[in-house]
Amino acid sequence: MPATTPINRRRKGTLATPENIFPACTALYATMSDNFKVEDVIARIGGGSNTTVGPLVKAWRANKGLLVSLKAMDAVCAVELVQHVDRILDEKVKNADAALADFNQGAGVVIAELAQEKELQEATLAQQAQQLANEHAKSLKLEHEIVALRAQLSTANSQNQQAIKHTQHLTDQLDQAKHQYATELSDKDRSHTQALTLALETQRRTLSQEYDTQNQKNTANYNQQLAQAAAQTTQLNQRIESLVMALNTAKNAASQIQHSLTLQSQQAHKQERALQHTIEKLEAELALKQTELQASTPAANQMLVHFKEQSDALLEQLAHQLNPKTKAHKKTTAPNVEPQPVINSSAPHNRHCWSRAQIIQGLKTGSIIQLSATGLVVKFVMSDGANSGYLANSKGDILRFKEAQRAIKCAEQLNQYRQQKRS
């Protein structure tokens, strides 16, 4: 619903106010009917512009029927009533629009923050996934190194077994040689053989010690490398488990953020629908107020007629009470025959065409309560409030002057007879 601009929101000190423009429009309407323009109103109030005066003239034309019907009421008050309803509805609509704008702004900020947090979580997840892939590659590399070390250890063990077998073979040959030459050698040869045997035994012990030392070194190195590989494997497994847990936690957080975004989006749609319903309700209230205002116009007219009837009755009663001889004098004196109006079939309903003499008589007797110039004709309103008429020519038709000033001058001359009656 587009926001309306109250027509009485004007700059302080300007002439373009309802108090100045509405009476000017009424006066121009009385002389020019509905043919006056905004420039005529500006000339009459002595200032203003089309921008400031135009909306007020438009408001007066929109409420012209109400203002003309309720002549006894203040026209400005009637229009101010419509303006007051318009201002209230305009304020409610502006409040609703402001609430909707604040909500949309807040929702936009929250959604932007959540989207930024989601992007940050996704970047963190990507980084953690890259780290997990790097750790997995390192783990595979260590496993390959362990396999290579195991192959080297197996080769070393095989070489050690071959050395042991070769040493055992040499020992067996030495034993056979000892047994073969035991009986053939002389004491001297036995002595030489013993020396040779001792040398061989010394060489065997040296080789056995070197083998044992090398075997211990190889076994210690293998065990140390195996322990290091096991420790690194344990660390990698722990790192992988922590990364998996962090990845699951990040996935859960991302799911919660997505769920929160969905709930906030649904809530935003609900509040938007509620605001739209409020706006539609305000529009319906505005239409109802306008309908009630239009419906109250006939009732106001009826109250005005009833008020006039009561006023006439009270005035007549008061006149009788102030001058009781007048009533007796009227009973004895022949009543003045009031001229009958000439009814023109071409005139509108409840409107009469009276001659100058008939209008003068009506002004003197009080049957005509208002007489004014409207455009090029002279119009009068009768005391019952329902009948009205125009000044007629000799043929009984409505008399239309060539200039509006002549009509105004004729109305002023006729109104002088009312002053005579009052004097």
Image (cartoon, rainbow, N blue to C red):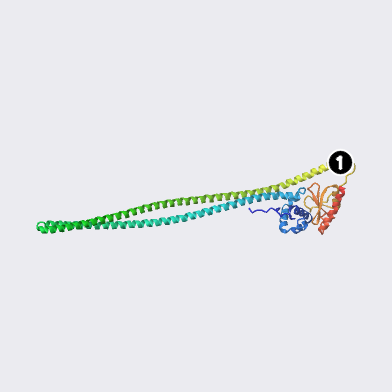
Q: Position of residue 42 (x, y in %)?
A: 76, 58
User: Across the whole image, how many numbered discs are drawn on residues?
Assistant: 1
Three-letter code for the amino acid on which mark 1 is drawn: Leu
Who's the residue at 72% across and 57% down the image? Answer: 52
Taking depth in this image into account, of 340 and 92 the one nearest to the observer is 92
Q: Position of residue 186 (x, y in %)?
A: 9, 58
Taking depth in this image into account, of 302 and 170 the one nearest to the observer is 170
Say which residue label 1 marks: 322
Q: Is residue 283 something one can see in this rendering?
A: no
Q: Is residue 205 something one can see in this rendering?
A: yes
Q: Position of residue 53 (x, y in %)?
A: 73, 56
Who's the residue at 49% across and 54% down the image? Answer: 118
Taking depth in this image into account, of 69 and 215 the one nearest to the observer is 215
Taking depth in this image into account, of 121 and 188 the one nearest to the observer is 188
Q: Residues within 10 Å of mark 1 (few under 14, many from 20)?
A: few
Who's the residue at 39% across and 56% down the image? Answer: 135
Note whether 152 is above or below 92 in the view shown.
Answer: below
